[in-house]
Image (cartoon, rainbow, N blue to C red):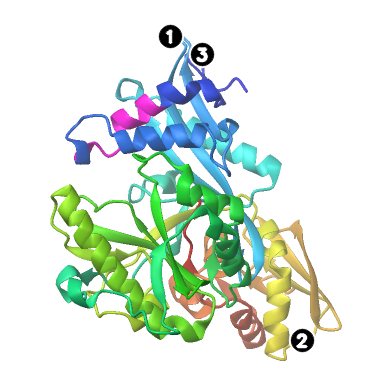
């Protein structure tokens, strides 16, 4: 895999890279937090990823090596995982830890690393790559803001229950919260497995839950604390929050779930009481004021709707890329078919063609029901071709496919999204609806 020009080679990561990559990333990531010193949380996270993470192997790293010294000078990692959209499995790679040593910047190493990464995923059939990070920067590598992240109100510490009021109700049948143990992993995986609805989620199996509970280094920036919501001995839900207060004094909530929706009114109350105790405990141990609980949840999440009122926050954004939008649509065939069936809709032609300004997706129907999505050659003038039902820019299709925008929103924002007639518009509006993003990625 010798790429990158005469001065550098791009190669897969190795376990033996752990010390140097940990030092590289610790010296360039989050320097505003450490005042220019190496970040120990970043170093521990890199070491975790290279030495035993259940979803990551060293080969998932890509490393730029300076041929003059033989030393790694830039790298990134793709964390492979399966997300689920309304029960449909979507292979995803979350790109993390993108960094170049300062003395090697300006030599297009990041561009070369991303090119190698995209080639890898095109060959292995991972249709979606996502990344959070610098505003606008990753657009240069084919990414677009195609998923919202967060948006739930921040709850000021002063609005949370007082310490004396925050104790769980021990009466019979009441829900309480306790720290999770590895013995809870199977039950937690079962909650993820049984989750329904149309949300975009990242479910975990028992092995990943065990890792989340006890597998990370104490100092790791990616370490989270898992608590379980119980009724007696029965696990009814979970709550995942930060292992420390942020630099701004906030306690971050990464995930919250209940096995039974009817539990949410009581669960939201005991979860906020638990977060109040944890935040005040961190305040005492860290010597840093506890300012607020900051949920990285969507504004419609039950914990946000049913809990203590807070201060509205603008959602952040995930950059998203797909190298093959037709393949992405093909993976969604069961979901699209189910949505049309639920609405009592049948397509009146054997095919429906969506041109993507270069390639096209041909949707095939049998007796009005979707059976397949296959690629076909695009046309020179898709907006006027009578055989094309819709012309959709690839970035707009990504927004639709992942439920980030509805078709009316796409039509409003993309003048080059053109539909043949009102029937096509209605049919595609039913297929593509907004869904809540409730992803806690496996990092």
Q: Is the magenta stretch mostly helix, strand or loop?
A: helix
Label placed on residue 6: 3
Q: Earlier in the sequence, mark 3 or mark 2?
A: 3
Label drawn at residue 392: none
Could you say whether the residue bearing mark 2 is in a helix, strand or loop?
Answer: loop
In the foreground, 228 or 105: 228
Q: What element carries label 1?
A: loop
The residue under label 1 is 69
**Residue 170 seen from this side:** yes
Stretch in magenta: 22-32
Contact flag, marks 2 and 1 (Cβ < 8 Å): no
Q: How far apart are marks 1 and 3 (CA)?
A: 13 Å
Residue furthest to the top in view is: 68
In the rendered structure, does residue 141 fall within the stretch colored magenta? Answer: no
Reading the chain from its start, which is encountered first: label 2 or label 1?
Answer: 1
Q: Where is residue 281 in the image (x, y as percent from the top left)?
A: 21, 58
Residue 339 lies, with reference to residue 120, above or below; the image says: below
Residue 346's tag is 2
Task: Inspect the magenta stretch and tell me whether residue 23 lies in it.
Answer: yes
Q: What element carries label 3?
A: loop
Determine the residue positioned at 59% across, 35% down.
57
Taking the spot 51% from the left edge, 71% from the top edge, the residue there is: 233
Question: Which is in the foreground here, disc 1 or disc 3?
Answer: 1
Apparent side of residue 175 relative to residue 273 in the rendered image (left or right): right
User: Residue furthest toward the right?
Assistant: 367
Q: How far apart are marks 3 and 2 (CA)?
A: 57 Å
Q: Which residue is drawn at 39% across and 47% down?
A: 223
Q: Which class describes the residues within 10 Å of circle 3: few (<14), some (14-19), or many (20+)?
A: few
- Where is residue 249 drawn, in percent x and y? 19, 56
């Amino acid at each position: 895999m010798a790429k990158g020009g005469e001065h550098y080679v791009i190669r897969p990561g190795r376990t033996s890279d752990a010390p140097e990559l940990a030092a590289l990333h610790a010296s360039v990531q989050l320097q505003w937090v450490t005042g220019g010193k190496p970040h120990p949380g970043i170093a521990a996270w890199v070491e975790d990823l290279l030495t035993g993470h259940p979803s990551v192997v060293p080969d998932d790293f890509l490393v730029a090596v300076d041929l003059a010294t033989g030393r790694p000078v830039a790298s990134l990692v793709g964390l492979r995982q399966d997300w689920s959209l309304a029960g449909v499995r979507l292979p995803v790679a979350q790109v993390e830890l993108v960094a170049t040593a300062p003395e090697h910047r300006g030599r297009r190493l990041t561009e070369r690393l991303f090119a190698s990464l995209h080639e890898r995923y095109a060959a292995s059939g991972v249709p979606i790559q996502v990344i959070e990070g610098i505003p606008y920067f990753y657009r240069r590598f084919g990414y677009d803001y195609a998923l919202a992240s967060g948006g739930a109100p921040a709850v000021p510490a002063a609005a949370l229950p007082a310490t004396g009021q925050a104790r769980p109700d021990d009466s019979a049948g009441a829900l309480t919260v306790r720290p999770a143990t590895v013995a809870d992993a199977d039950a937690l995986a079962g909650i993820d497995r049984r989750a329904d609805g149309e949300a975009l989620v990242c479910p975990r199996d028992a092995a990943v839950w065990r890792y989340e509970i006890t597998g990370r280094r104490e100092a790791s920036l990616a370490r989270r604390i898992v608590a379980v919501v119980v009724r007696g001995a029965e696990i009814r839900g979970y709550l995942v929050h930060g292992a420390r207060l942020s630099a701004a004094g906030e306690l971050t909530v990464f995930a919250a779930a209940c096995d039974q929706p009817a539990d949410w009114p009581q669960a939201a109350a005991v979860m906020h009481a638990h977060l109040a105790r944890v935040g005040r405990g961190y305040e005492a141990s860290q010597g840093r004021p506890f300012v607020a609980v900051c949920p990285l949840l969507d504004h419609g999440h039950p914990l946000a709707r049913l809990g203590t009122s807070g201060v509205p926050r603008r959602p952040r954004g995930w950059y998203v890329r797909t190298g093959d939008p037709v393949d992405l649509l093909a993976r969604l065939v069961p979901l699209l078919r189910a949505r049309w069936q639920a609405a009592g809709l049948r397509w009146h032609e054997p095919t429906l063609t969506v041109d993507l300004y270069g390639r096209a997706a041909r949707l095939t129907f049998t007796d009005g029901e979707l059976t397949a999505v296959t690629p076909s050659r695009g046309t020179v003038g898709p907006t006027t071709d009578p055989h094309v039902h819709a012309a959709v820019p690839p970035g707009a299709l990504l927004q639709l496919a992942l439920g980030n925008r509805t078709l009316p929103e796409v039509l409003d924002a993309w003048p080059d999204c053109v539909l043949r007639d009102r029937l096509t518009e209605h049919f595609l509006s039913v297929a593509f609806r907004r869904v809540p993003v409730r992803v806690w990625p496996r990092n």
